[in-house]
Image: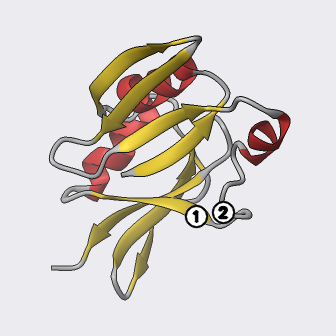
């Protein structure tokens, strides 16, 4: 399971569930403002949404990988996924392109993390 540091749980849930269409796998109140919030695509990897709790963590939001792509989301229908993300207001940073490994486009979450949407070649 990967972890994504977010400014608040609700903003993370809104993006992942409402915009990307991920499942809300778990949202458990742990007390003292902490929650265990897990999201993920159907039959895919899970992401723990971790709320920043100090200045150092807050500074890492959106730049957990130093500006590189942080996450990779595979799809079996790039055109449909790309169209759905665009319609949902996802910030697509570049036009789709063909690469040796498949079709890809970079998008970002509202926190600044970069993602690759990829339809791998068969």
Vertically, is 15 above or below 106? Answer: above
**Residue 16, x across and y down, in percent:** 42, 32
**Residue 6, x across and y down, in percent:** 62, 33
Q: Secondary structure at mark 1?
A: strand
Name the residue rendered at 47%, 20% in the picture.
35
Does any portion of residue 109 appear in the rendered image?
Answer: no
Name the residue rendered at 72%, 53% in the picture.
63
Checking the image for residue 65, the label placed there is 2
Residue 29 relative to residue 111: left or right: left
Residue 16 relative to residue 34: left or right: left
**Residue 94, x across and y down, in percent:** 59, 59
Badge 1: few (under 14), some or many (20 or more) residues near its Cα, within 10 Å? some
**Residue 15, x across and y down, in percent:** 48, 28
Residue in the foreground of this view, choosing between 98 and 50: 50
Q: Quadrant of residue 91?
A: top right
Q: Nearer the viewer, mark 1 or mark 2?
A: 2
Q: Secondary structure at mark 2?
A: loop
Checking the image for residue 17, the label placed there is none
Distance of label 1 from label 2 (alpha carbons): 7 Å
Residue 106 relative to residue 47: left or right: right
Q: How many numbered dots are placed on residues in this image?
A: 2
Badge 1 is on which residue? 69
Residue in the foreground of this view, choosing between 10 and 98: 10
Residue in the foreground of this view, choosing between 73 and 29: 29
């Amino acid at each position: 399971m990967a972890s994504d540091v977010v400014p608040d749980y609700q903003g993370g849930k809104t993006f992942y569930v409402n915009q990307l269409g991920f499942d809300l796998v778990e949202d458990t109140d742990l007390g003292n403002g902490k929650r265990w919030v897990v999201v993920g695509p159907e039959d895919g990897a899970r992401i723990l949404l971790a709320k920043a709790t100090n200045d150092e963590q807050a500074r890492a939001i959106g730049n957990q990988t130093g500006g590189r792509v942080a996450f990779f989301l595979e799809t079996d229908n790039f055109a449909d996924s790309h169209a759905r993300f665009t319609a949902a207001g996802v910030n697509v940073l570049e036009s789709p392109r063909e690469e040796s490994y498949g079709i890809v486009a970079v998008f970002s979450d509202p926190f600044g993390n970069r993602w690759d949407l990829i339809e791998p070649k068969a």
